[in-house]
Amino acid sequence: MTFRFLHLADLHLDTHFGGRSLAKERLRAATSEAFRRAVDFALEERLHAVLVAGDLFDDPCLSLHTELELARAVQRLAEAGIAFVWTCGNHDPGGKTKRASGLALDRATEDEPWRERVRVFRGPQPERFIVKDASGAPVGVVVGAGHSTDREDKNLAADFPRLATDLPVVGLLHTQVESALSAEHHDRFAPSSPADFERQGYAYWALGHVHVRQRAVPDLPVWYAGNLQGRNPRETGAKGGLLVEAEPGVPAEPVFVPFAPVRWETLALSELEGVDTAAALADLVEARIAKLQGTVDEELAVRLELTGPCPLAARLKRAGELDAFEEEAIERTGVVEVQLRTRGLRVPYDLADLLESPSVLSKAFELAAGARDDDRLLERLAPAVLAGLPADADEPERRAYLRDLLAGIEDELVERCLGKEPV
């Protein structure tokens, strides 16, 4: 028997986005649209189940509109014979006073028998749910455990049982696997290690919490689906869910299915020495975004990282100038959002000329260069207390920290000493 299901995670419905009002509205709508696409896909493919590995919604104050939309989607699935199985995460914990506890999606009644195909794992003790096909025949077992609070610190994966069954078994959990890519960018909730997934012999583990799609444990069917819709510039690339066909005792290999209508991407722009007018920079940005638009199917939200010497560096860093230029780029390209980052941008200068000229700036360069090699000079120039350095740091740690602060100091000195215009 093959158990066919869609693995979703980290939908974060009702996210309160920052930024421009139009971008906020589009991203909020895109999250709901991605969920509708996933539901439509499950119906079209006649899957057995949709599994959501936590953080179904983002805010405990779930809006009435989103709650109704969610209930309609779940009912559509269940009435078509498709189970909806959701385990609670840190954003949607299932404790008695929490919002997920009040949602009666899985409270079956005589008038609404479709709710028998819905299961919500609200607490940390693993429970099992038998998924049946449209005719009522069992096709798979889902074992799940949920977060009862928004700060679950227990290793929930360690308690998942090994089952004696002829059906494919799937684990459903919202967890931070310590070795997973990008795990360090997420809170350490329901922490687990690769060893926790070795002994049960499950056909598949459907995980949530880390927003990067990946196999979380090498050589085992333990997968993060990633989030359904990228929410910020760090969450780049296509987003969606994982289609899984699980067989008893056989590790399942999922297939990615894109659902997100909006895609975040980051572009690096360098070699800007010859870009000395706003029009020239706008043309360059437009061309780069247009080239990217030709390679993807989704709407785009773009972060542009400008680096290196550029005659416009000082102007772009003035208050208000960057916002105006971003608005121009959005109008020209039609993308959802454009964010420019100028941290690596600097005014052009000739270091040799500056060093030869008698000035405060050349003296500052001389001191910075000397401090990189001379411990005594380094300590003499440094303040006694350094922000970001532990008070108990030893001398080697302190000196390494100071030398790291000196990296790229020449660019900052030029900008501070030479003011608004390039040399």
Image (tube, helix red, strand yellow):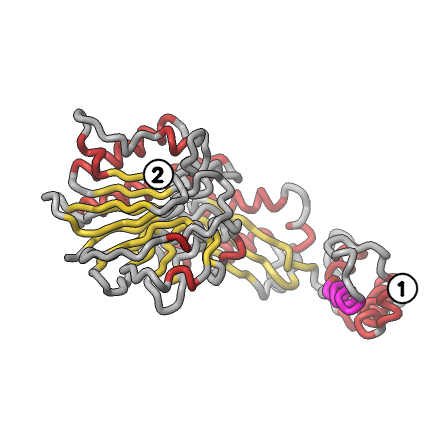
Residue to which mark 2 is pinned: 32
User: In front: 317, or 45?
Assistant: 45
Residue to which mark 1 is pinned: 380
Q: Does the image show residue 114?
A: yes
Q: Does the image show residue 26?
A: no
User: In front: 241, or 281?
Assistant: 241
Please count the marks in the image.
2
Residue 158 location, quadrant:
bottom left
- Distance of mark 2 from mark 1, alpha carbons? 58 Å
| Residue 166 in picture, x, y percent from top left | 18, 58
Q: Secondary structure at mark 2?
A: helix
| Residue 396 in picture, x, y percent from top left | 77, 69
Q: For the residue marked with disc 2, what is the amino acid?
A: Ser
| Residue 241 in picture, x, y percent from top left | 32, 52
Quarter of the image with the C terminus is: bottom right
Residue 217 location, quadrant:
bottom left
Q: Which residues are magenta?
A: 395-404
Q: Residue at x 21, y 39 (%)?
A: 117
Q: Is residue 317 left or right of residue 395?
A: left
Residue 81 location, quadrant:
top left
